[in-house]
Amino acid sequence: SFQVFGIATNSSQSELLNDSRPVLVRPSALSSTNQQKFLQVEFETNPLDKKSDYRVKVVSQSLEIKYNAPTINKLAECFEPDADRNLQGVKQVAYSTYTDVKHRSFILMKHNIEKIKVLDIYIDIQSSYLLLPENGVYQDGVAAICMDLGHLTLKRGTNQENHYEESHAPTNIEGVRELSYTQFKLKLTDIQLIYANRNESWENARKEKNTRLHLIKPMELEMDVDKCIYHDDAVLPAWKMAGNIPGVELRLSDKRLFHIINHIQSIPFPESKHPISEIPTLEAEATTAQSLLSNPEQTYETVEGMTPVKKTLEKVEGSENNDENSEEEIPKQALTTKKSDFEGQLTQLEATFTLDKIILHIDEALNSSNDDDEGEPFLQIKLESILAKTKIKTFDMEFDASLGDLIVYHEQFVGKDNQQLRLLSAELNRNEIQENKKLVSVNFLHTSPDNPLFSSSMYNGIENKAHVHFTKLVVILQLEALLSILRFQDALMKKLPKDTPEID
């Protein structure tokens, strides 16, 4: 078993006895009834099945974590930094590190793959959850916010299972590059957020997965993480990540919104006793540091000796001038490839994240006289096809994001098609031709002025470039639906706490 105790809430009782101290962390009731071991760790070298060189297995049961305000506030006081110490006086000089970029042949990469030590890893951590009780102290029947962190599994990918079989040996450079990565698959399931008012059972809601107490219904996340065995390859990114969330569904009523606001305001969170108010008095110029860039010419010569960026740049510009006359015969793609080959940058991270849809249900309940009434559906906001990509290089960072569609439904009115009234959408009638059309797309490129090609035609001396594209957005205005939204907004504004003092 595993338990973490907080400080005693009753000063008359001894703090040495655990009976008078709140339990902050312990195995959940479900895992304790199964009489399973809380944590199992296995490590094996040279398994008998010979599918890997090392094998690691970690299995952990779920934990119940309770927030206790007195204990957390006491810990915050212990770790609060001394106000008399000036940590900002310690300074460092950051400078770029130039790495020798290497191009590897097919035979060399294949030889390196055969020497890889394969790690078979399996991690299984059951769903742990955090309870945030009202007033910061948990008691039976008290209102609580339950954040379920989800069931985590991490295992090795399938690309290295047949590395050493001759029938599956790679025959080209692309196959070798694919096998140059150690793949891991991460999966999180049953991530959910629950708000249970007084005398409402968050335990039952957590088991049933779909109740009116759910603020965020159970969702899952899948992610592929690939790590390259080379850290200085000119073509292969050091890390590749691809994540996907099938969907996120949220439900919130106006009445429950105010319950949550009051709930959070009732918790005494840690506060700093030494507010930082003397930041302007710090003398940044008083502390001098020996900069490596104090002599630009010497630094440039050092960099030139490590990576011949000047000669590379001259080659690129010279090849462009020589090929101006024969520009019609050489495709533009070839020129772009030639220029990218001379960039001399390493790709540190290449990541892609997709979210199929986000659905937000808004219910109206403030007009109801019944306290137990959670209201009726009012608005539904739907975001579709969210995509984000990024690529981080030595000097560059590229970011692309897009949103497929934004749809707003009024669930108390019916449109001409006998469906819920659609107030806002990118296209009313989508067809096959418009499926790949995006409502919003954003492209952003950031480069460092230290980039050797910063002044070339590729960047034109521009550090940040952004391109935003919007497509057609269809808005339908219906007088009754618009008035109902205004009434809903007015009711919310009247219920908001007014903390602004009156001026005499």
Image (cartoon, rainbow, N blue to C red):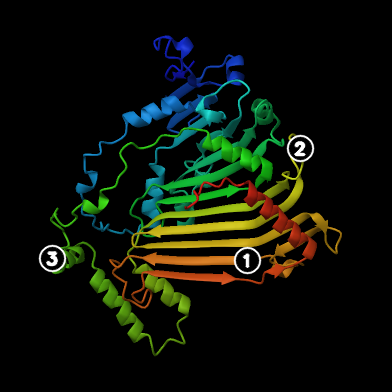
Q: Residue furthest front?
A: 504
Say left or right for 88 vs 225: left
Q: Are marks 1 and 2 in contact (CB under 8 Å)?
A: no
Q: Secondary structure at mark 3?
A: loop
Q: Position of residue 239 (x, y in %)?
A: 42, 50
Say left or right for 231 vs 88: right
Graded by Cα atoms within 10 Å as few (under 14), some (14 to 19) or many (20 or more), the crowding at tag 2 reads few
Q: What amino acid type should be assigned to the residue bearing mark 1?
A: Lys
Mark sitting on residue 295: 3
Q: CA distance from mark 3 to mark 1?
A: 49 Å
Q: Residue at x 47, y 61 (%)?
A: 399
Q: CA distance from mark 3 to mark 2?
A: 73 Å
Mark sitting on residue 292: none
Dot 2 corresponds to which residue? Answer: 373
User: In terms of sequence position, does the residue under pointer 1 or pointer 2 come before the other?
Assistant: 2
Judge whether 408 appears above or below 150 on screen.
below
User: In terms of sequence position, does the residue under pointer 3 or pointer 2 come before the other?
Assistant: 3
Q: Residue at x 60, y 37 (%)?
A: 189
Q: What amino acid type should be assigned to the residue bearing mark 3?
A: Asn
Q: CA distance from mark 1 to mark 2?
A: 39 Å
Dot 1 corresponds to which residue? Answer: 438
* Quarter of the view holding residue 489: bottom right
Q: Position of residue 207 (x, y in %)?
A: 68, 28
Q: Position of residue 335 (x, y in %)?
A: 42, 77
User: In terms of sequence position, does the residue under pointer 3 or pointer 1 come before the other?
Assistant: 3
Q: Are marks 3 and 2 in contact (CB under 8 Å)?
A: no
Judge whether 35 appears above or below 419 on screen.
above
Q: Is residue 56 visible?
A: yes
Q: Nearer the viewer, residue 204 or 60?
A: 204
Q: Mark 1 or mark 2: which is in front?
A: 2
